[in-house]
Image: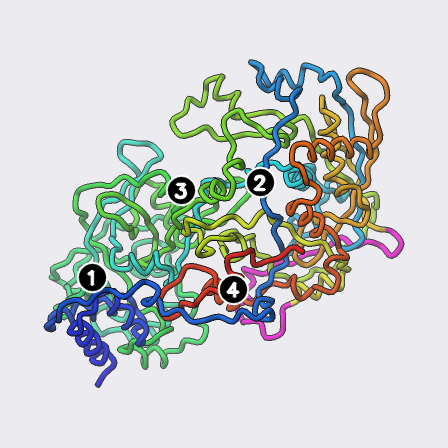
Amino acid sequence: MTDTARFEALARKMFADGDDEDTIFDALMEAGVADEMDAEDIVERAKVAPRAPARKPAPKQAQARRKPVSDAPEDRERWRAPYRFTPLNTVVVGPQPEVAALLESDQPDEGLHATPLPEGFCGALDISVIFDGPMLIGVKDGDAQGPMKISDRCCIPGATLRGLIRATVETAAFGRMNQTNMHRRFATRDFDHPMLRNDRKHVNAGWLTQSRDTPGAYEIEPCDWRLIRIRDLQGQGRGDGRMHLAWLQSGMLKRYAAFKMTDGKPGDCVDFDAARSFSTLPDERGPTPGAVPARDGDFSGVPVFTDSSPTTRKVTTRTLDDEDRQNAFGQAKKREAVFAARGHGRRLTVPAQVWDNFVANNSRPSRHAPKPDGAWALLKPTLDAGRRIPVFWIGDSEVLELGIARVFKRAHAHSVEDVLKRSNPRHVPGDGDPDFVEALFGYVREPEDGADRQSTERHRMNHLRGRVSFGFAWLDDPDPRISAAQDAILSAPRPSYAPFYLSGGTDKDWSDPTARLAGRKVYPARNADAQAVERFLAKPTGAPPENDNPDIRSKLRFLLPRKDRPLRFDGEIRVHNVTAEEVGALIWALTLGGDPHLRHMIGRAKAAGAGQARIELRLRLRPNAGGEAPDAAAFRARFEAMMEAAAPGWRGSDTIRALLSAADPAAWEGREPELRYMPLKEHRKLQKIVGANEGKNAVTQPPWAKDRVLKTN
C-alpha cells in the first residue's frame, strides 16, 4: 500500500468512527503528511465514505496530548540569555507640585523654560565615562564596525548617553515604561500555535493595489487560485530533479525573470497583468485545485512565486527525485501558486492596523522607519508604481491578516500596549499627563487617529521640551588602542520571544489574554576583558553551517584600555530650571545610587560583557535664588527621600534591587554560563514548554513556567 493510500484509509476510518475534520487533519499530520494542503485534500477525498454519528469532541486538554516536562532545577537552568529584566514598578511617580503647576498653565513649555522655580537650579554636570575593558560605539569602517570618530577623535554621542541615563532614571524614579512602540503587534509562523492551526483552511488569494479613493490606503480584490507542481511549471511532466533543485536555489526575481515577467534586477517592477492558460487537474478535488500549463485551458492565471528556499543545503537532485511523490516531514518545497488573472470584482479595504502589522512583520527594524525585507522588499516597487501584487489573506467580508506567502506570519491577538495596560495601566500615558521622568526629559507623542494635529491644544498635549541636554563625550587619548577585527553574530533584540519577555498568564504568548510583561531589559555587568569578550563572540564548536553566512556576521573593532590607563570620555550634561530632586535623580542614575562598584553597560556587544563603565561627575550648578548649590550626596539624598515618600519601601523594592543587582559585577562573578545565548533548538524547545501550542509537539507546562524565566538575583 502506498503512503497516500494508507493516509486515505486512515482518514476514511476516522470519518467512519465519527471523528471531526480537525481531529483527522491532526492525525494525518502526525502520521507523516508533510504538506498541509495534501492533508486537506486527503480529508476532502475521505468525506465520500459513510460516516457514523459524530462523537462529542474530546476536551481541549485531551486533544492537545501534551507531554510532561521535567521540573528539576538542572532542567530549568538550561534556559539562559545574556540579559535580564527588572520588574515593572507598580507605582508611577508624577512631577513635583511646583513643576506640575507650570505644566498646568496655558503654555507649559514656555512656563517651565521661562519661569524660574524658586528652589530650582541651572548649570551643568561635568561627567567622565570610564571603561576598564573593551567598548565600541560602532560606525562603518571598511568591512567592519569601528569606533565612532569626529575629526579623528573617538567619542560617545550625546544621544547614546541620553538614552542610557533616561532609561536608568525611568527605572529608578518609577516612571512609565513608554519608550517603546506601543502599536507593535508581533507575529508568528509556528505551525503548532493554535492561531495558525485553526486558520490553515481559510487562506484566500487576492490582488493588492493602492486604494483608488483614499491616498495612503490599500485594497485587495479577491480571486480564485490554484496550486502547481514546480516540475510542471514548464509543462506537465517536463521538470526533473535538476530543474527542481535549480528552482529552489533561485530567488524570487530570478524566477519571475524566467517567465519574462521582469528583468530580474532589484527595484524592477513585476508584470502581474500578463495572463497564461492553465488546465485544472481533474483528479484534484480538495479545496485548492491543482493546475498545469495548457494551450487552451479552462483557467486564465498568473504564476505567483515565493523567494528562494533557505533549507536546500543538503538537498540533491537525487533526494528530490526520490521524494517527488512521497509525503513525509521535512521534505523540500514542491508547489507554487497560480492566481486568476481576473478577480471577483469587489474590493476590500485593508484596515490601517492590519496594514501596519503587515509592514512590520515583513520589515527589519531601522533607525527611522521599518526597512522592507525579503519578498516584500522585492514586490514593494511594483506596488509603489501603482500596479498590483499577489497576496494571501485571511477573512471573509473584511481583511483580518495578509501576507506574501501562502503560510505567512500571523499577528498575535495583543499589541505591546495591550499587554502593558494589562501589566499595569498606570504605565500608559494620557494626554498632557507626564510623569516625573517625562517632565524632566520631555516627550513627543503621536496624536490619536482623527485628531486635529494642527491645533494649539493638540500640540500642547502631545509634546514637552526637556530641561536636560547631553553633549558628546570625548576620549582623552589621542592615539587609542584598537583591537583587530573580531567576527561576531549580533542580531537585533527580539521582544517577540515571549518565553523571556513575558511573565505570568496561562501561556507565555502574545496572544494570551492573561500574560504580563517581564519588565525592563538590562544587560548584567561583569568583569570582562578583551579575551573574555573574544571568547564570547567566537563561533562555538559544532555551530551550524548557517553561522558562516556573511550576511549574518559582523566584524567589530573595539577600543581597548591601556594597562595603566582606562578609557576615559569627558562630556557635559546641561540642566535648566530643575528641582533639587530632579538633579538628584540624574546623579543617582549616573552613579547608580552612589556605589562606586556598580557599572553601566554602553555600546555594542553588551551581551559579551563589552562596554562596562562607571561615571564620575563634578557639579557646576547655580541656584535660581542665588547662593551655593549643595554637593552631589545632598542632591541624591533629596531624590531618595522624595521616592520613599511617594513609594514607601522604594529602596528595597524588587525593581530597585533588580536594577542594582544587574549593575554589580561581583553578583555575576563565576556565572558566565548563565549569561550565554542558548542554541536555536533550545529556544524552540523553551517556546514549546511555556507557550501556546497544540498537536503532537505540545508539552505540559511545569510550575515555574508562569514566573519570569530569567532571574535577576
- Kind of residue indicated by mark 3: Asp
Q: Is residue 503 above or below residue 570?
A: below
Asked whether the beta carbons under mark 1 and mark 2 sit within 8 Å of each other, the answer is: no
Dot 4: what SS? helix
Q: Position of residue 676 (x, y in %)?
A: 64, 63
Q: Is residue 257 visible?
A: no
Look at discs 4 and 3 and give the one toward the viewer.
4
Residue at 65% over, 55% down:
712
Q: CA distance from mark 3 to mark 1?
A: 29 Å
Look at discs 1 and 2 and give the one toward the viewer.
2
Left or right of 593 on screen, residue 461? left
Q: Answer few, some or many: residues within 10 Å of disc 1's Cα (few below 14, many 20 plus, some between 14 and 19).
A: some
Q: Quadrant of the N terminus?
A: bottom left
Q: Which residues are magenta?
A: 539-565
Residue identified by numbered label 4: 683
Is 555 a magenta residue? yes
Residue identified by numbered label 3: 356
Q: Position of residue 457 (x, y in %)?
A: 48, 18
Q: CA distance from mark 4 to mark 3?
A: 27 Å
